[in-house]
Image: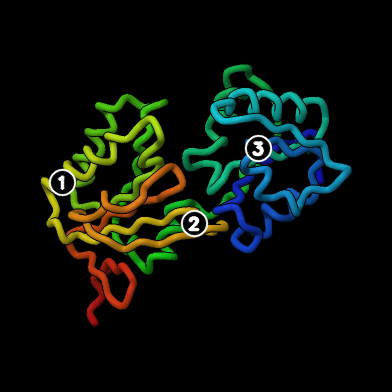
Amino acid sequence: MEDNKLFIVGIGPGNIEDMSRSAYNTLNEVEVIVAYKTYLNLISDLIKEKQEIYQSGMRQEKERAEKAIELAKKGKSVAIISSGDPGVYGMAGLVFELIDERDYELEVEVVSGITAANAAAAILGAPLMHDYAVISLSDLLTPWEQIKKRLRNAAEADFITVLYNPRSSKRKEQIKIARKIFLEYRQTSTPVGIVRNAGRKGEEKIITDLNQMLNNKIDMLSTVIIGNSETYVSKGRIITPRGYNL
């Protein structure tokens, strides 16, 4: 393992089985692991006594990124962790932005991981077989009006749509508004898949439709997939035809 190098590691859904070999090997070999404490708990079985650990809480992403960069610049081999893939709503962009802003010379490697969209889709069947969009309903970093515009564009264009961060304890109306927007362009019978804790303990799968989706538990641990106009349900699986001549 090279010193003076920063690895931005995607751990996928969070279980060892769904982690790439590259991510697994990197986490085994680095001197320092920097992580949000919840994600650190998911990989606790991999951590060695000799490894230095730096953890912090929610909304402290910049602090973690700065710490990881600082430790790597001091000559350590460092891994900073994201769930899913670090380049999809993860830590990769923030790390690169900070390095560019400060004009640092530092070797960085992004280690990809299975996204929540892909993990949820595999559990549901094959809902993402055609063009799809991924939209976060969290307005912490994106104005809500802009999110609504993206929802409307995805719905009008008949994209299969994956919703991240669909509902929190304080943010309850956004998922209702998203459903209302999609009902302007899709049938009430359009299949909807809801997966909670994908690839983790307590995993749950719900297959419903636009009409009934809000009757089910949806929270920050959930990934919601709304089908397109051709998506259907068969034998407990959501399927979107790709268009092959069968």
Q: Secondary structure at mark 3?
A: helix
Q: Secondary structure at mark 2?
A: loop
Mark number, residue 156: 1
Which residue: 67% across, 52% down? 23
Q: Please tell me in which quadrant of the rendered image residue 15 appears.
A: bottom right
Look at label 2 and name its amino acid. Answer: Ala
Relative to the observer, which residue lies in front, 8 or 53?
A: 53
Relative to the observer, which residue lies in front, 95 or 41?
A: 41
Count neighbours of disc 3 (C-alpha within 10 A) and say few if under 14, some if 14 to 19, many if 20 or more.
Answer: few
Which residue: 74% across, 39% down? 33
Q: Secondary structure at mark 1?
A: helix
Which residue: 76% across, 52% down? 46
Give residue 201's position: percent from left, percent from top.
57, 58
Count neighbours of disc 2 (C-alpha within 10 A) and say few if under 14, some if 14 to 19, many if 20 or more.
Answer: many
Q: Quadrant of the C terminus?
A: bottom left
Q: Label 2 to label 3, Cα distance in Å?
A: 18 Å
Mark number, residue 198: 2
Label 3: which residue?
Answer: 37
Q: Please tell me in which quadrant of the rendered image residue 22 appears.
A: bottom right
